[in-house]
Every structure is written in C-alpha cells, then in structure tokens.
Image (spheres, coloured by chain):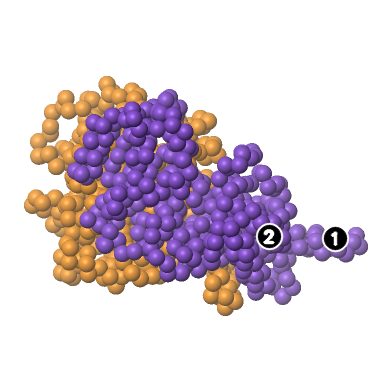
Amino acid sequence: MLKIKRVPTVMSNYQEEMSTEAVGCGRNCLGKCCLHVSNLPLYTFSSNLNSPKSESFLSELLLAQWEERMRQGLFRYDVTACETKVIPGPQGFIAQLNEGRHLKKRPTEFRVDQVLQPFDPAKFNFTKVGQEEVLFQFQNGGLIEKSYFLERAGVDPAMAPNVVAINVSPIEYGHMLLIPRVLDCVPQQIDQDGILLALHMAAEASNPYFRLGYNSLGAFATINHLHFQAYYLNIQLPVEKAQIEMITQRGLGESEKGVKISRLMNYPVRGLVFSEGNTIGDLADVVSKACICLQQNNIPFNVLISDRGHQIYLFPQCYAEKQALGEVSQELLDTQVNPAVWEISGHIVLKRRKDYDEASEASAWRLLAEVSLSDERFEEVKEYIFAAIGVVESKFEVNNEEKERAEEAAMLDGNMFEPVASHFQEGCLVVE
Amino acid sequence: MDTSSSDSDPVRLSLTSRYSDWVLEALEELSDCFLITDPAISGHPIVFASQSFLSMSGYSKSEILGRNPRLFQGPETDRGSVCQIREAIRTRQSVQVTLVNYRKDGTPHQVLFHMCPVFVEEDGSVVHFFAIQVPIVRRPGTRPCSKGLLRGCRDEVRKGCDAHAQKVFDNVCSRVSEEGETCMAGEWERERALNAANSIISALNRYNNFTGLVVSTKQCCGPRTIPAFSSCLNLSLGGINKSFVLSDPHLPGMPIVYASDAFLSLTGYSRCEVLGRNSRFLNGPGTCSKALQEINASIGAEKSCTLRLLNYRKDGSSFWNLFHISPVRNATGKIAYYIGVILDEASKGELNGISPEMWQFGTVGAVKVAVRSLSFSCSGPSWSSNSR
C-alpha cells in the first residue's frame, strides 16, 4: 500500500473539530437526523437550456450568500487579503501566497494507491457539516419556465437534495463545494448524474469566469464523499489559453453523441478536452464514461469544467504515486504544493513567501510537468478511454487538412487566428 | 425595443457628448460596416451602427442601439473567437478574428471582425470600442465553393442579370456552406479593415473641436490619474447592475472613483458631477450624525457596516438609504477601495424576492471578484505605491 504524508486542507469547520469518535447530533447538521426538519435556501434551476437566463441571477445569489458567511466569520481567513499575481510569461500562471490554507497540526497519512475507496461513515463527510456552512440547495426543476430562488424552503430528503456549501479554506473569493445527493453518501467518484449536475451549475451561473473542478482520490481529493469545487476568478486560466488539437471529429454516431475530443498542446500537463455534444446530457455521458474508465483502471485524475460548462478538461496524473515512490525532488516537495485541479489549471497556491517571490514560469512549468503522465503513458490511457467511450480516432487525412489550413493562415499573416469549423447547439455570449 | 429617445439617454449622447454633434454625420459618411460600443454604459451597448452594417445585418438602427453586440452571434459562431474578443475587451487591446454572425433573418455569414479600443490620448482611458465587420468573399484560387453555393451562382448568371448576379454571388459565397467549410479572410479583407479603422479614428478626431478630445487606437503614456482607473473599472464593473460607488481611501478626501449607472439614476447626478467628490454630498439636514460617525468608525477600523440613513438626491428630494459599506481588496491583498451600496428603502419590494441584505451582499461579492483581478488586466500604476 502506497502512502504519503500530507497536510490536508480543512474544508469544513467540523472537519477541524472532528476527532475519531462520531459526534452525536443536535448540531443542525446535514445528516438524515437533522435535514428533514430544516429549512435551507433553495435554488431550483430549469433544465431547459433555451429558457431565458438572467445572466447573473445564480452568480449574484452565490456571491451574496458567500459574503454573508464571511460576515458570520465562518472562514478560516480572508482570502481577499492573500497576495496574488500573474507570473510574467506567455502561459500567465497565477500564483497566490496563502499561508493559512494548511492545517498547522501533525500531518496525517492518506492512502493514495486506490482511486476507488468505499465510503466510510466514521471518517469526516459532508453530512457532518453544520447547516450554516450551506449556501443553498441546488435542485433540478425539470423543464420549468425559469429558475427561481427561495430564501427558506423545507428540505425534502426524498428529493435527494444537492447542496452548495462554503469551503472554509478558500483559494479565491466564492470558493464553494457542490455536493450532489448529500444524503446518499456517495464516495468520491464520478458518475453521470454528478457530472451532469456540475454542468448544469456551470451553465446556470452563466459566467465564463466561474469554474468547477474535481479531484479523484489519489489526485489530492481530501474527503471521500462526492463533491466538486468551484470559484470565481476574473482572468483566463493558463490551461484555458492553451492551444488544443482536435483528435476526433464531432462524430454523430451513437457513442460519440456529437462530442468533440481534443488534446492539450504546449501545456506542461497532458490532458484531453471534451466539448460540444448534442445535448448537455450527452456531454456528461461521454465525460463520465471517460472518468469511470480511469477509475476502474486505478488512474488518478482531475477534471476542470470551464466556459459555462462547454469545455471540460480531463487530466490523468501520477504525482502522488511518484511522491510515494520517492521520485519527486526535495525542492518540489518543500513547496508543499499538492497539484490538484486548480494548480494543474495554472492557479498555484503557495505556502511560503520565498516560493511566491521567486515564482517563475519555469518553476511553475517544472512543477506541473512532474504531475503529467509521460507521452507514452498518456497515449496508452487515451486508448483505454477511447475504447470505453466507443470512439475511433479520426482518420489521418482530417488532421492533416486542419494542419494545412493552420499553416496557410500562419503564412498569410501572423495576426490571423485560425477559425475552427464547429457547430454549437447553444448561443455564445460575450461578457459585457 | 426602442431605446428611450429622451435627450438624457446615455446611448444617444455617448458620441456627441464626447466629440461633437457633427461626428455622427461624419461617421455616417463612411461606407464600411462597423459598430461603436460604449463600455462605460452598463451592458457595454452599441451606440452607433453604420448604414452598411444595418444593410448587411438587416436590422434597423432602433433595433440594435442600446443592445450588446452578442445579439449577432448564434449557434455556428466559434466559441474560441468569442473568447478572444472578450479577452481583448478586458485587456483593452485590438483583435482581429474570423467570426460567424447572424442577420436579422437568421442567416449566418462570415466576417473578418476587427475591433479596436479608442484611447483618450491625455489620460489613457478607453472611451469606446469600435468593431468593423468585413464580409468574407470566396475568391477563385482558394477553396472551391460547395455544390450548394455554385448552384446559386449559376442560376443567377443564367438569368442573365449581371449586376444582380454579382451581388448574389457575393451574398451566397459569404455564407457558411452546408458542409461547414469556412472561408478564409485574405489580404483584401484585412486591408479594408485597417482602412476603415483609420477612417473612423480620423472622423472622431476631426470632430472633437468642441470637446478637445484627442483619441487614438494606441494607448499612450499619459499621467496616471483617476480617469485611467475609471476606464479599467468601467470595463470590469460595468456589468454589475446595482447601485453602488467605489471610493479610494488613499486619495485625499476619499473621493468616488467609480459610480454605477444605477447609482446615477437613483440619485439624479451625472457621472462627472460625482467622480472625484466625496460621497458626503448625499447627506443633508435630515441625515443623522450618529450614522455618519458609525460609517467613519467602520472605515477607520477597516470593517464593514450596514445602516439606514436619510440621503438626498440632486433635486433635493430625500430617501431612506439602506446603506452598506465594506472594504474591497485588490490582488495585493491590501484594501484598494471602499464600496458603498445604496438601496432606496422604498424599492425594497422590487428586488425579485431577494432580501435587501442579500441584494447588498450580492453587489459587494460581485465587486470584490472584479476588483481582485483588476490589476491583472490593467497596466496601471504600480499598485504597491497605492496600498497602505
């Protein structure tokens, strides 16, 4: 069994207080004991993506509730007081100096050789979180005309409530956790429903600077209870700026479901990019199949949901394994950076002033390159994924044609951006 | 829906108030397809559309003035291009991309989209953006037209109507073909775009006699004063449709450096009457001094506070202000501004079911997110010299 010593991040105040004994209730938690007699704010979204969306409705509510929790003093520190900068260089990595994020206690051991581990009710999970840490329930209202919000609503456990909670150790303003079907106590693993809910949230927030992320066990998830993270940052993440190269055309077959699969280029971490899809459900289906394939092959991975849910990045990684096998340089270990989805996307939280002041594009690239699978291993993993999804890589000529057009464009004028032939089922929005 | 035709409509005044009344005529004379937008107005709307643009798109002027140009996008519009445009607006740079736009009748067409910010030379602030659209035409020697397109061309030529055939040829070839082939913009389109850009800037500068405003598409080094900040703030905060002001505690007198449109509507002041002044002009005889002391104490302690006080509009009428003030930090982690959220108590029933508190907090949250990454997009003065 591979183990590493890590200082975990505390996501809930109750995680900090927890000892190993189960705590009795009466604490107004999110368990079956309390939830059915509670009132929580409720946001019900319309799954009809063509219904008119007030662009900032969900975002304003999220931010309002988050600010209110700040007022209540629920966060371990004020994240807006943490220095942040863009590291000079073409990638534009974002570095943050955050000395308060990690526990000051003794590090705990965490098993990293198993991506799938059964849910353990004795360990900390989100049913133990106090209700004050919950921003609201987030429910699918089906094809209702438009989304609505109630500041107080009863919780109906039969409806499998999904909750949005604060992350008490935020890395940015608005850092929150999306916990699908909290009462079902699903361990940290991707399924179609989970991804679909996350995509709906991204679409509903309707803000290109709002992203959701997922870390599998072994890829620096801290809690074995299904959750996604999300926050706002009004700048393009480096991974979002990176070029992508299409691998499969937008196939219309049963398995492809109109999803386009590309690979990341010129970026330190190798990854796949899923976009388009005939419907949001189809995109969720293909992405979840890819993730399930990785889970079943015990390959840790991270997922970034970007661009209002239209662009999904999948990064298989191997950093924890390398760490356990002693293959990571001491210099990198000393930074104590756990390369989870935000770090991999280019937003790097540093604990030491020295690392922050000396942060450079080269050092960030070096760190992230350690996280990435090698070329050969990535190709292998890509094959597993394609087999699982039932997709065939496009014929050679298609890729060649694209390359020719790109070269032609580059020759005509350095300024010209190569348009990508694409079809979208939804309108695009330019942010004001 | 028609925008208001009153004299004080910011959309209609956007150009004439900065240049002169004649600038509209000069712009009308240009034969290119272009739009001008004003980032200082909430929603970053169109304030001018050339005749050619209206013909090309099929819209009438009243249908698009006051609206954001995203209305021309549709299913086939490339998301990557849209992201590039958005980033260019945020970082105040020029951009040139190929784009699929949609006419009023729903038909898509390809254009070379060329957008430039208009900088005020004196202080480097961005006062407008203009966006030129050059329709892309297929020319022999590039990709062959698909069958559908050629059929259209041949039919028209067969009818023997030469001038009309040419027009149809242009029209048809600028459509995206059924198989999804895209047209490439060539030298010709790019040159047209650059010429159009030069013409627009010349027109703007020629008719600035009244206001003395000199503009260009390049940001020059100018004195870093409040207006430059305003421009950055306008772009980041323009989308927040709430009534609030930002005051800078590092400048003497703690003046207002940003005021939202909603604030100006609520209080009846114009932007230039408000920028640079301390917000105490909202107070009056009925304003309780204890409330003012509380506000000052909060600022001194770098804390937030919420209270209710009597404030006055420009016309002298009073209203109960459900006021909330909070420090707002930027990327250095230090306090950069104080936000004052102003809510007229009389309108608290019109908040779509949201409580006044949540309304205030939502505003604060959105502004905090925006200000946090402000310094990433604006090459302003070094922030450390401004922080405490």
Q: Position of residue A20 (x, y in %)?
A: 10, 39
Residue B26 — which label?
2
Instruction: Establish if B14 lies above or below A91.
Output: above
Q: Colour of chain A?
A: orange
Density class for disc 2 (Cα within 10 Å; few <14, some 14-19, many ≥20) is: some
Q: Nearer the viewer, residue B330 or A111?
A: B330
Displayed quadrant of residue B53: bottom right
Q: Residue at x 79, y 63 (%)?
A: B169
3D distance between C-alphas at marks 2 and 1: 30 Å
Instruction: Establish if B297 lies above or below B333.
Output: above
Q: Position of residue B136 (x, y in %)?
A: 68, 64
Q: Residue at x 38, y 70 (%)?
A: A90
- Which type of secondary structure does the marked residue at label 2 adopt? helix
- Which type of secondary structure does the marked residue at label 1 adopt? helix
Q: Position of residue A33 (x, y in %)?
A: 22, 25
Q: Which chain is purple?
A: B
* Count of marks placed on residues: 2
Disc number lying in front (2 or 1) = 2
User: Would you name the residue on which mark 1 appears?
Assistant: B164
- The three-letter code of the residue at mark 1 reads His
Q: Position of residue B190 (x, y in %)?
A: 63, 70
Which chain is mark 2 on? B
Q: Residue at x 59, y 53 (%)?
A: B15
Q: Are marks 2 and 1 in contact (CB under 8 Å)?
A: no
Q: Residue furthest top?
A: A37
- The three-letter code of the residue at mark 2 reads Ala
Q: Nearer the viewer, residue A79 or B337?
A: B337
A120 on left or right of A205? left
Displayed quadrant of residue B100: bottom right
